[in-house]
Image: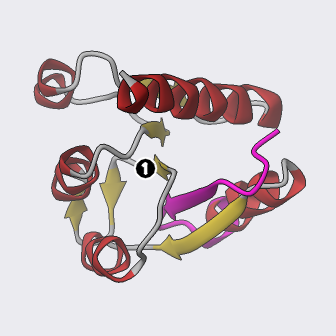
């Protein structure tokens, strides 16, 4: 499972955000947020000392999630995109290894992809 890993949730649809947070909790992870806007997400990234991963929607109420993704990438925080749309080509080009899932996804798949992303990040930081 996620064994205490802190995962930022960035989703502007309240029910989906609550569902993701519940999935994380069920998997023994610690949801951070949720943030429903780019502004809120960037504030959480600045304020929270430790984040192990993030789950992001692509389109938020105040615009595309790109600034959030860039801030997470700069800190080396692994990210899974969970969206009802498609991943824009510019994001795919800048982040070719980014895991992108289309809503809806079974909880086990989302948790599995987060574990994979966290594991890959941990191996990179140990190298």
Magenta run includes residue 3: yes
Instruction: Please identify the quarter of the rendering in which residue 104 is found.
Output: top right
Residue 114 appears left or right of 117: right
* Above or below, comparing residue 69 to residue 10 in the picture: above
The residue lying toward the viewer, choosing from 95 and 16, is: 95
Magenta run includes residue 100: no
Most distant residue in the right direction: 26
Quadrant of the frame with the C terminus: top left
Q: How many other residues sit within 10 Å of disc 1, few (<14), some (14-19) or many (≥20)?
A: many
Q: How many labels does the image show?
A: 1
Image coordinates of residue 56 in percent, x first then y, are 43, 50
Label 1 sits on residue: 57
Image coordinates of residue 105 in percent, x first then y, are 70, 31
* Above or below, comparing residue 39 to residue 80 in the picture: below
Image coordinates of residue 123 in percent, x first then y, are 47, 23
SS at mark 1?
Answer: loop
* Above or below, comparing residue 29 to residue 93 in the picture: below
Quadrant of the frame with the N terminus: top right
Most distant residue in the front direction: 127
Residue at 71% in and 67% down: 18
Residue 111 appears left or right of 36: right
* Above or below, comparing residue 23 to residue 83 in the picture: below
Residue at 35% in and 83% down: 47
Q: Give the range drawn in magenta.
A: 1-16
The residue lying toward the viewer, choosing from 59 and 32, is: 32
Instruction: Please identify the quarter of the rendering in which residue 4 is found.
Output: bottom right
Image coordinates of residue 19 in percent, x first then y, are 75, 59
Residue at 79% in and 31% down: 106
Residue at 16% in and 57% down: 67
């Amino acid at each position: 499972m996620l064994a205490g890993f802190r995962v930022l949730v960035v989703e502007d649809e309240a029910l989906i955000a609550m569902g993701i947070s519940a999935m994380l909790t069920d998997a023994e992870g610690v949801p951070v947020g949720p943030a429903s806007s780019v502004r809120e997400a960037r504030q959480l990234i600045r304020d929270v000392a430790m984040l192990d991963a993030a789950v992001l929607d692509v389109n938020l109420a105040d615009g595309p999630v790109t600034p959030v993704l860039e801030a997470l990438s700069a800190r080396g925080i692994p990210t899974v995109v969970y969206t009802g749309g498609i991943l824009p080509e510019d994001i795919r080009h800048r982040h070719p290894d980014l895991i992108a899932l289309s809503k809806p996804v079974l909880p086990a798949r989302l948790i599995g992809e987060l574990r994979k992303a966290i594991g890959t990040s941990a191996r990179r930081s140990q190298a």
